Image (cartoon, rainbow, N blue to C red):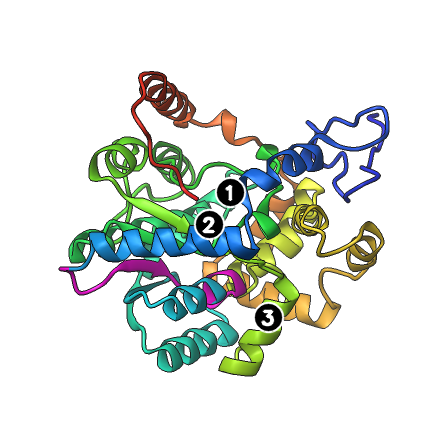
């Protein structure tokens, strides 16, 4: 039996089997994140100058187009606050919302409140429900951890397809280092991996992707970054992004509604993260989210531990969410019990594009070694 270990600085623990603690009991996750922090996050005058330069470049590149940049808008705090910052900076934004069939009431309200008050154009793309349902059910039957891949892949594909349609190559992202610097690779898998998605769809679902928006390996790993020249600007890394303050500002100025945990604006993700993962795989993604905030000095370890002590679900809410979840995916109670009892499996047990990612990394390194600048997401 393995010995339980927990970092003495953040709250990551041995639910990540690859965690490494140093002699002082500090883990590799927070040590690596702290080592990168000042290379990625900027605030004050430096952050303002960086933002001005990036915004000006985006404006110049798109001065003859209807929009300066595309932003994916989920109704969550990160994408909402990124949209606010980009709009205040004067960018003409096209907000894209990919409706995968799992929007919470709060998410719908938040999107509408933001686009109305900021004057942003919104394009909503509704994914074919039968293809989404079939894929999501297939990932649960496969017993892999990242069952959010179908939803995340569709969102990435939709945003890129809409951007290509309007001719925009600049993206504003709500992705940020402050709240997302830590996420063990053993807990997930790259959502862009279409080979992996298709393999699981064939083995555990119908295998059909009719009506499902998707991007192939060449598009994801080579065409978009190297040939089409898309640029993603993580605007929240160039401000003092305080999660608690951002929530309060959104509530005060836009009537934004809080939905609870990180990514819980999706009812699918709420049940998947708060029930399926801890019950079947034994890890609580709050540990990564809270540890990221500890690294960003927005929480101390004691506060993070206190939040972890709060149950993921109140029992009445869990019963309601489970009933809704199973009915929507058309999974019976008996089949769900079998899914939960089946041995957990790794994404590596199924065909995947890890080799493509390695090739992409080597191509980038080769270009940079010859003095060819490769655009990075910042």
Where the C terminus falls, by quadrant? Answer: top left
Image height check: is 108 above or below 304?
below
Packing grade of label 2 (10 A; few <14, some 14-19, many >=20) is: some
Which of discs 2 and 3 lies nearer the camera? The answer is: 3
Pick the residue in front: 97 or 92.
92
Residue that numbered label 1 is attached to: 141
Q: Is residue 155 visible?
A: no
Where the N terminus falls, by quadrant? Answer: top right
- State how many labels appear: 3
* First of labels 2, 3 by sequence position: 2
Residue 289 appears left or right of 256: right
Please name the residue shown 17% across and 65% down the image. 66
Q: Position of residue 198 (x, y in %)?
A: 35, 37
Q: Magenta span has 247?
A: no
Image height check: is 232 above or below 130?
above
Pick the residue in front: 20 or 296.
296
Residue 189 appears left or right of 310: left
Please name the residue shown 74% across and 40% down the image. 12
Q: Residue furthest left?
A: 64
The residue tagged with tag 1: helix, strand or loop?
A: helix
What segment carries the magenta color?
64-80
- Kindly identify which numbered label has been placed on residue 137: 2
Q: Is there a contact, CB below 8 Å, between mark 2 and mark 3?
A: no
Q: Name the image quarter holding residue 173.
A: bottom left
Q: Is residue 329 visible?
A: yes
* First of labels 3, 1 by sequence position: 1
Q: Position of residue 236 (x, y in %)?
A: 50, 56
Residue that numbered label 3 is attached to: 247
Residue 195 appears left or right of 113: left
Residue 180 appears left or right of 125: right
The residue tagged with tag 2: helix, strand or loop?
A: helix
Q: Is there a contact, CB below 8 Å, between mark 1 and mark 2?
A: yes
């Amino acid at each position: 039996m393995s010995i339980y270990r927990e970092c003495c600085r953040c709250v990551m623990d041995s639910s990540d089997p690859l965690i490494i603690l140093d002699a002082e009991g500090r883990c590799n996750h927070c040590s690596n994140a702290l080592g990168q922090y000042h290379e990625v996050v900027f605030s004050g005058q430096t952050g303002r100058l960086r933002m001005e330069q990036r915004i000006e470049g985006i404006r110049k590149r798109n001065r003859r187009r209807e929009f300066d940049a595309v932003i994916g808008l989920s109704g969550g705090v990160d994408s909402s606050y990124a949209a606010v910052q980009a709009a205040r900076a004067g960018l003409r934004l096209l907000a894209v919302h990919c409706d995968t069939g799992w929007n919470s009431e709060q998410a719908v309200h938040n999107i509408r409140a933001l686009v109305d008050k900021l004057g942003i154009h919104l394009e909503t793309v509704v994914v074919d429900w039968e293809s989404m349902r079939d894929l999501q059910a297939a990932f649960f039957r496969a017993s892999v951890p990242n069952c959010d891949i179908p939803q995340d892949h569709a969102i990435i594909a939709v945003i890129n397809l809409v951007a290509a349609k309007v001719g925009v190559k600049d993206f504003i992202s709500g992705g940020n280092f402050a709240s997302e610097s830590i996420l063990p690779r053993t807990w997930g898998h790259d959502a862009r991996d279409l080979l992996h998605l298709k393999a699981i769809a064939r083995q555990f679902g119908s295998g059909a992707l009719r009506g499902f928006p998707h991007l192939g390996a060449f598009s994801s790993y080579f065409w978009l970054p190297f040939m089409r020249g898309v640029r993603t600007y993580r605007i929240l890394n160039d401000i003092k992004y305080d999660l608690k303050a951002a929530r309060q500002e959104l509530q005060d100025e836009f009537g934004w509604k809080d939905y609870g945990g990180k990514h819980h604006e999706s009812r699918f993700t709420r049940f998947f993260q708060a029930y399926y993962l801890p019950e079947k795989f034994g890890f609580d993604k709050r540990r990564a989210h809270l540890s990221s905030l500890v690294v960003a000095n927005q929480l101390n370890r004691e506060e993070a531990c206190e939040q972890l002590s709060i149950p993921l679900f109140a029992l009445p809410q869990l019963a309601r969410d489970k009933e809704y979840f199973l009915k929507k995916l058309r999974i019976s109670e008996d089949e769900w019990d079998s899914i939960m009892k089946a041995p957990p499996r790794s994404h590596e047990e199924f065909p995947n594009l890890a080799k493509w990612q390695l090739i992409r990394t080597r191509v980038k390194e080769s270009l940079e070694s010859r003095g060819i600048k490769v655009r990075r997401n910042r």
